[in-house]
Amino acid sequence: MTLSKNQAQILVGGQRRLERLVSTGMIRARKTTDKQNGRWECNGADVVRYTIDPDKH
């Protein structure tokens, strides 16, 4: 299952956190095109693993 960048960033707690997790390899993601504004496909299992509880923050 894949999630879009917008869906994933809501679950992990924000765009910066998602980008950091992707850059360190903790969340596997790929861009569907090589263009700057190409769509991201994030691995759903990885995203769920790093999901935060919004009630705690």
Image: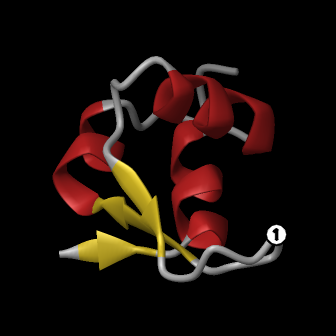
Say how many tags the image has.
Answer: 1
Given the image, on which type of amino acid does mark 1 rest?
Answer: Gln
Residue 27 in percent (x, y) is at: 35, 37
- The image shows residue 24, relative to residue 22, as above or below, that is above
Residue 44, percent from left and from top? 26, 60
Q: Is residue 3 above or below residue 32?
A: above
Q: Residue at x 37, y 30 (%)?
A: 50
At a point 59% along the width and 20% down the height, the residue shown is 56
In the picture, which quadrant includes the N terminus? Answer: bottom left
Relative to residue 35, is residue 52 drawn left or right?
left
39 or 50, nearer to the observer: 39
Asked which quadrant contains residue 18, the reply is top right
Q: Quadrant of residue 36?
A: bottom right
Measured as percent of width and height from the top left, residue 15 is found at 76, 44
11 to the left or right of 10: left
Horizontally, is 18 left or right of 30 in the view?
A: right
Colour scheme in use: secondary structure
Residue where numbered disc 1 is placed: 36
Res 30 quadrant in image: bottom left
**Residue at the image position 65 percent from the left and 36 percent from the top:** 19
Left or right: residue 12 versus residue 20 is: left
Tell me if residue 55 comes above or below residue 33 in the rendering: above
Q: Quadrant of the C terminus?
A: top right
Residue 39 on image: x %, y %? 61, 80
As helix, strand or loop, the secondary structure at mark 1 comes to: loop
**Residues packed near mark 1 inside 10 Å, few (<14), some (14 to 19) or many (20 plus):** few
